[in-house]
Image (tube, rainbow, N blue to C red):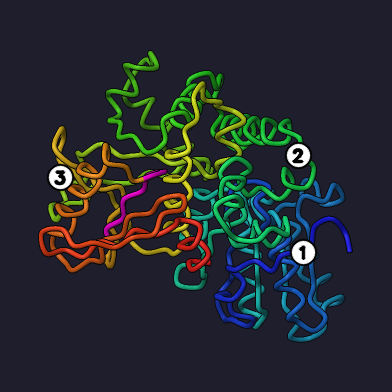
């Protein structure tokens, strides 16, 4: 046994083994897409695999697809599933995938670009693909990989370490620093043909340092001295497309109010956030909130925050729950946290009121509303 076991990815359980639709695995660089694809391959008999970043395939274009398809037909048994890694490296790759689907093949592809995959899949594979987002390790996968017992101590380490497998294996912060540079300079600057990335890098570092806070595009533009709001808007879009950041809208039954309200922003990983944007003071509450957001985001349902400026706020509102997150519930913050839950539960729909902390357990009734206080590590394990 090595120091770390291979961890079965939780997402795999929801991915079909055979499908008439292309299985598309997307996510940030180095989050484990290729390992997940390898785990999916183990379900198949004689699968065919090709890494399109292989140097021998450099310059592969649509003109080469007939020959490439002939090679696949020669090497892959009839009916064998086809697995293609890093498809964004090949222009018009979606034509290749469609040809394989037309031949009755099960096809699974990976890629690191959310917008690239979304737009190109939509243009050529309309109605013929199923997309799955791959994230760094969840808390459940983290404790399995590091062989820890779930609990508050393990959660504290997870909030520091994050879930990127490469970093957890080698414990070298330069891995995460290089990851951020790769995403900004290669996935964003090169593909978007940007002449300089200073504003994009400043923006991601600023939002990493201020996760869970609401910002309008105008306030970001002013705070970071970006020349124009339109440039800020494009930069935010690039960061969201590359999976470095996620935007959380404010809850409202009015479409107009949802669109104009400022978004909150969360980081793809707490370890990456800590390494590239270190905080002078401990920010356990912010890290915990970020971890809870990522768990909710992976479930795929609608999420928002709720609140009224200078009055009340609830961290997360889903179809079933209103959730507040704090490191510790104390007499000093109890009124604020409870008020946010009370107001959120008065919004349209019926929701369970939940307050997540590092390691507190309690339950009480406030103004007729039952509020459950639960350890976040336990809630995260249940989500896994």
In this rendering, the answer to whether 215 lies above or below 306 is: above
> In the image, which residues are magenta?
322-328
Image quadrant holding the N terminus, namely bottom right
Q: Residue at x 55, y 27 (%)?
A: 277
Which of the two discs, 3 and 1, sits closer to the camera?
A: 1
Q: Which mark is residue 6?
A: 1
Q: Residue at x 57, y 33 (%)?
A: 274
Residue 112 falls inside the magenta stretch: no
Tag 2 residue: 171
In this rendering, the answer to whether 45 lies above or below 110 is: below
71 or 216, nearer to the observer = 216
Q: Are marks 3 and 2 in contact (CB under 8 Å)?
A: no
Query: Where does the image place residue 82, in percent across and percent down from the top left?
Result: 72, 73
- Density class for disc 3 (Cα within 10 Å; few <14, some 14-19, many ≥20) is few
Q: Answer with left or right where residue 102 lies relative to residue 343.
A: right
Q: Residue at x 65, y 66 (%)?
A: 9
Of the two numbered discs 2 and 1 on the same chain, state the one appearing first in sequence.
Answer: 1
Q: CA distance from mark 2 to mark 1?
A: 17 Å
Q: CA distance from mark 3 to mark 2?
A: 44 Å
Tag 3 residue: 257
């Amino acid at each position: 046994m090595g120091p770390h076991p291979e961890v079965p990815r939780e997402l795999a359980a929801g991915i079909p083994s055979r499908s008439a639709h292309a299985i598309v695995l997307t996510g940030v660089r180095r989050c484990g897409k290729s390992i997940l694809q390898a785990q999916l391959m183990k379900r198949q008999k004689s699968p065919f695999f090709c890494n399109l970043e292989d140097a021998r395939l450099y310059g592969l274009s649509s003109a080469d697809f007939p020959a490439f398809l002939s090679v696949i037909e020669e090497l892959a048994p009839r009916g064998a599933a086809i697995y293609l890694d890093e498809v964004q490296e090949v222009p018009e790759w979606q034509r290749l995938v469609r040809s394989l689907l037309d031949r009755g093949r099960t096809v699974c592809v990976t890629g690191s670009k959310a917008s690239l995959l979304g737009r190109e899949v939509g243009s050529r594979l309309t109605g013929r693909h199923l997309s799955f987002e791959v994230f760094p390790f969840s808390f459940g996968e983290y404790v399995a990989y590091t062989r820890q017992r779930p609990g508050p101590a393990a959660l504290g380490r997870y909030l520091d370490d994050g879930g990127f497998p490469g970093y957890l294996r080698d414990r070298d912060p330069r891995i995460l620093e290089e990851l951020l540079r790769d995403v900004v300079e290669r996935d964003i600057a090169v593909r978007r043909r940007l002449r300089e990335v200073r504003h994009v890098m400043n923006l991601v570092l600023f939002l990493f340092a201020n996760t869970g806070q609401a910002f309008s595009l105008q306030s970001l533009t002013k705070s970071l001295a970006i020349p124009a709001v339109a440039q800020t808007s494009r930069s935010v879009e690039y960061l969201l497309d590359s999976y470095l950041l996620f935007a959380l809208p404010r809850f409202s039954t009015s479409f107009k109010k949802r669109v104009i309200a400022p978004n909150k922003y969360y980081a793809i990983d707490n370890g990456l956030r800590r390494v590239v944007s270190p905080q002078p003071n401990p920010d356990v509450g912010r890290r915990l909130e970020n971890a809870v957001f990522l768990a909710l985001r992976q479930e795929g349902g609608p999420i928002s925050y709720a609140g009224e400026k200078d009055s009340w706020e609830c961290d997360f509102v889903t179809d079933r729950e209103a959730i507040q997150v704090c490191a510790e519930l104390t007499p000093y913050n109890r009124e604020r946290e409870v008020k946010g839950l009370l107001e959120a539960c008065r919004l349209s729909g019926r929701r369970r009121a939940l307050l997540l902390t590092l390691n507190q357990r309690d339950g009480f009734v406030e103004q007729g509303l039952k509020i459950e206080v639960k350890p976040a590590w336990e809630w995260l394990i249940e989500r896994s």
